[in-house]
Amino acid sequence: MNIEYYNDRYQSNIYKGLEHCFLSSRVVEKIRHSKILLIGVGGVGSEVLKNLVFSGFVNIHLVDLDTISVSNLNRQFLFRSEDVGKYKAVVAKDRITKLCSWSHITASVENIRSRKFPLEFFKQFAAVICALDNHKARLYVNEVCAFAQVPLFETGSTGYQGQVIPILAGTTECYNCEPKPPQTEHIPVCTIRHRPETVEHCVVWATYLFEVLFGNLEDSNPLSDEKEYKVSRLSREWEPNDAGSESVTEKDWEDMTCERIMNKFFIEDLQFIESLKEDTVSSPSRMKVPSQEQLRRHLWNVEEKHSVEDLKLEEQNPHQLVWTSDKAYEVFIFCLKQLLRRWKESKGALIFDKDDTISLAFVTAASTLRAIAFDISAKNSFDVRGIAGRIIPALSTTNAVIGGIVVFQLLRFLSGTHIKDLYNARLSQVPRSRPRHSDEVIITPEVIRPPTAECVICHELLLVTCDTRKVTVRQFVEEGLKEQTKVEPFSVATDEGYIIYESEPDDEVSIESRNTDMSTFAQLQVEEQPISILDESGVHYRAWIRHQCDIPLLIERISSFMDDGCDCL
């Protein structure tokens, strides 16, 4: 069969079906010509991309900087075993394009916060679909869509739970309106990747390392391709006192096994990550990779200076200090040897238990060493226990349901339904009323609520257009904020917390702002980035700095979206 003929016929059938559903060729043409930005091509993103193409969308832009790991294969159907190590966005584009030749997909291997994506980039899209698992990145996407006045469909899944939230900042409740406290959020396993960004990622990695070495290895484990490092296999390489061969003592076997494990996971893996293509925003400037000599020094010179009782006391103290690199290595080696002895006694798989002192100390030490390597603030064992208790699996079924709902909501919106007449969709697991029946998973529609009064994203946005190479911070304050918007700023700061202006610089910290307020926005590198403004009355504003060389300085207040549905697109 001619593939091109099949694709053309299949495409035409899609549009015939859409016209039959919406009873309007105008809606079908709008769907066909709408450009969609999909951020994140992981579990939910893979399902969304497939549904977009099979629903008639042609122009799709993908943004994702992640690479494919083995653990992705059981729930991200676009990827194969031969794709491991490749970039998700590139592989997804190639696979969908091969399947649906009529689609025009662009793939960007970048952090969404990169300056390669200015405000004008977002304005070209009819809608943005966010399928990220990173809280900070989702807050950023929510904010930039508010500045660009582009509809956002926020998605997420965790175990049996998931949600789809249509957002028009200023008209509906946005992602920032009711932020969840970080300590109450579940941590999906899909946050494991080659470049961890938070200590939670490091803790999850450490629990998987425990499973790789001592547990029953499952395909969902991101490290499942490291089967040769299971202790059960390593033990066959150096059998102590094996007849007919040179005698290997228990201590020699422990030392050799520890050295091999540490070389693999704390040197070779980090060197491989460092060799991957660097991206300008997310990559650390320099990873801290130890040398083999350093590891050997820790391995051969370590003394049994730790005890189970001491570690137990530490895990019960919420105020204990975070371990240094040296102590983390000492505890890791101590616990690794304790677990090796425990495994040899049981001759069976060990299960990670956050309430077991040795297991918890092993994970704490491993996560600390990984956090140090990526310049991330580590946590003590008390906090690590809490993080480890919130790790739950990602499910392909949940991803598929959420991926279907978000595209259905997008189709309704583009067909003319006002976004306030859509619904927030919640997927949750609820107990059945009758005994001896398993819980059921249901989809609950929720009426979209208006913005909260306290949300700065929904109410206090300023769009600043100027020649960023010429306009200084002081000009922005005096000629812009005070004259054009009648805002009397008390302080102006970047997203990194760097103060660039203060109205009353009378302490040592403010000395910096005295110098920076004469710098241009370009010199401070805040073009195409948001900044924070606090006025004298305590009102908090967010401003987006946009470069345009033919405009000296213009500040506009961003109001709510239009009230005429998708015609605002």
Image: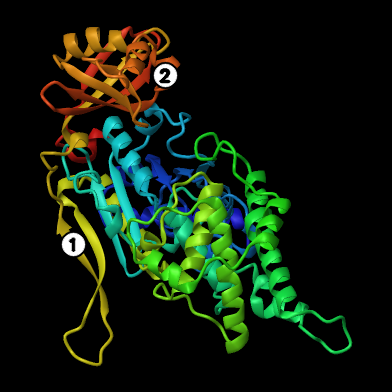
In percent of the image, x 16 and y 39: which residue is there?
171
As displayed, is residue 272 above or below residue 366?
above
> Horizontal and vertical percent for residue 220?
51, 70
Mark toward the start of the polypeptide (1 vs 2): 1
In percent of the image, x 33 and y 70: which residue is there?
160
Q: Is residue 513 left or right of residue 168?
A: right
On-image quarter of the C terminus: top left
In percent of the image, x 57 and y 88: which residue is there?
346
On-image quarter of the N terminus: bottom right
Q: Between 471 and 495, which is closer to the camera in this rendering?
A: 495
Kindly indicate the quadrant of the structure image that contains residue 305: bottom right
Q: Can residue 18 be seen in this view?
A: yes
- The 10 Å Cα crowd at callout 1, few under 14, some 14 to 19, many 20 or more, is some
Q: How many marks?
A: 2
Disc 1 marks which amino acid?
A: Pro
Instruction: Tell which residue pokes out farthest to the bottom in this image.
Output: 436
In percent of the image, x 35 and y 48: which residue is there?
135
Task: Give the alpha-carbon distance from disc 1 to disc 2, as whole Å.
Answer: 45 Å
